[in-house]
Image: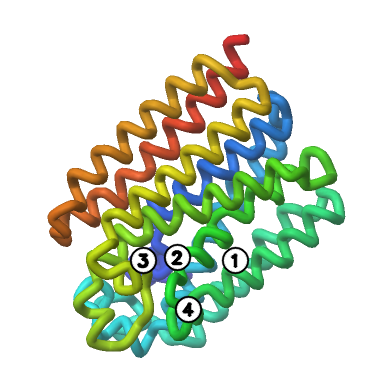
């Protein structure tokens, strides 16, 4: 039986102590489930997608730390992560990632073939994302696909098809991920420049704040168009406006490019996603 300290190390590896990543994955997935089911999602599906989100985000963290084990030591914020600091072996991290991925896949065995095919693609995207930082100028866009692939999966599970609206929501999620993960990348920009890692914060340069706000604008616009097509009105609009208020708050946090404030803006995106989901859920519930 592993000791408490060992379990805590593995919990740190998969970031269970930092649930913000789970939440940023969960909100777009829940939004898709509500839209796909006309506001009445199956509780079994909700459970499957919730735990699948937790497990796949955890597996993704283990893969990310494995891929970045020689890079993280040069970044102030990540130097003490379990693999980099030598507390967990790279082989153990790979085993954990594989185990969690298989466990996540087992959850969707009762679902249709299309959902399983989407899950296979999602695993490939999650596993290859860490390596995009080596060559892709805006790896945050690829992260947006990884963090948003629960959207087409949700529609596939509910409707056994993936309509155009699902792909539009995925595009919206890509813009949102570029926005919030650029805020995150602004925290590490100085370290990333030294070691040659590519991030959107470096690519956008002095236009980083403007780029973030443009990405928010694109996300809000696409989300509004899709929700309106689904007949969502007053409560959705209320949640949507609150989310816009969150984005405005983020602007005032990041405009001076202070590390702590940029990190605060990144974490606050949980409330932005929650506001949009709450508006959608209330709109369906109060009809």
Q: Which residue is drawn at 22% across and 79% down?
A: 191
**Disc 3 crowd, CA 10 A, few/some/many (<14, 14-19, 20+):** some
User: Which numbered disc flags the more N-terminal residue, 3 or 2?
Assistant: 3
What residue would you read off at disc 1?
A: 100
Which-is-in-front pick, marks 2 and 1?
Answer: 2
Q: How far separated are the C-alphas under marks 3 and 4?
A: 27 Å
The residue identified by callout 4 is: 136
Residue carrying label 2: 140
- Mark 4 vs mark 1: which is more N-terminal? 1
First-in-chain label (2 vs 1)? 1
Answer whether labels 3 and 4 touch (C-beta < 8 Å). Answer: no
Which dot, 4 or 1, sits closer to the camera? 4
Coordinates of residue 92 in the picture (x, y in percent) = 49, 82
Distance between mark 2 and mark 4 Cα atoms:
9 Å
Q: Name the residue under label 3.
A: 12
| Residue found at x 34% / y 61% | 182
How packed mark 4 is, by other alpha carbons closer than 10 Å (few <14, some 14-19, many 20 or more), is: some
> Does residue 179 appear anywhere in the picture?
yes
For the residue labelled by badge 1, is the local secondary structure a helix, a strand or a loop? helix
x, y percentage for residue 133? Answer: 44, 79
- Residue 208 placed where, x, y %? 28, 61
Q: Which mark is residue 184?
A: none
Question: Gap in Å between the C-alphas at discs 4 and 1?
Answer: 27 Å
Quadrant housing residue 32: top right
Mark 1 surroundings: few (<14), some (14-19) or many (≥20) residues within 10 A: many
Whole-Å distance between the Cαs marked 3 and 1? 15 Å
Q: Which of marks 3 and 1 is nearer the N terminus?
A: 3
The reply to whether dot 4 and dot 1 touch (C-beta < 8 Å) is no
Which circle's residue, 3 or 4, is located before the other in the chain? 3
Residue furthest top as drawn: 287
Say whether residue 18 is visible: no
Give left or right: position of 287 versus 64: right
């Amino acid at each position: 039986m592993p000791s408490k300290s060992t379990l805590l190390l593995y919990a740190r590896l998969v970031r269970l102590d930092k649930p913000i990543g789970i939440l940023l994955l969960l909100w777009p997935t829940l939004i898709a489930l509500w839209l796909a089911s006309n506001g009445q999602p199956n509780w079994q599906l909700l459970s499957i997608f919730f735990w699948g989100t937790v497990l796949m985000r955890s597996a993704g963290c283990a893969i990310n730390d494995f891929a970045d084990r020689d890079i993280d030591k040069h970044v102030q914020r990540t130097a003490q992560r379990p693999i980099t600091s030598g507390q967990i072996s790279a082989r153990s991290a790979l085993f954990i990632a594989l185990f969690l991925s298989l466990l996540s896949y087992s959850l969707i065995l009762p679902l249709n073939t299309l959902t399983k095919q989407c899950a296979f693609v999602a695993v490939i995207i999650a596993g290859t994302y860490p390596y995009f930082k080596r060559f892709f100028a805006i790896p945050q866009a690829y992260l947006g696909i990884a963090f948003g692939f629960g959207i087409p999966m949700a529609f596939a599970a509910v409707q056994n098809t993936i309509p155009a609206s699902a792909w539009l929501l995925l595009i919206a999620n890509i813009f949102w991920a570029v926005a919030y993960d650029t805020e995150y990348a602004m925290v590490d920009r100085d370290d990333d420049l030294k070691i040659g890692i590519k991030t959107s914060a470096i690519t956008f340069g002095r236009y980083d704040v403007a780029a973030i706000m443009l990405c928010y604008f694109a996300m809000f616009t696409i989300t509004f168009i899709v929700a309106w097509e689904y007949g969502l009105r007053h409560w959705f609009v209320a949640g949507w406006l609150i989310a816009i208020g969150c984005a405005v708050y983020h602007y005032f946090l990041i405009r001076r490019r202070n590390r702590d404030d940029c990190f605060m803006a990144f974490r606050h995106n949980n409330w932005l996603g929650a506001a949009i989901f709450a508006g959608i859920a209330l709109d369906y519930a109060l009809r």
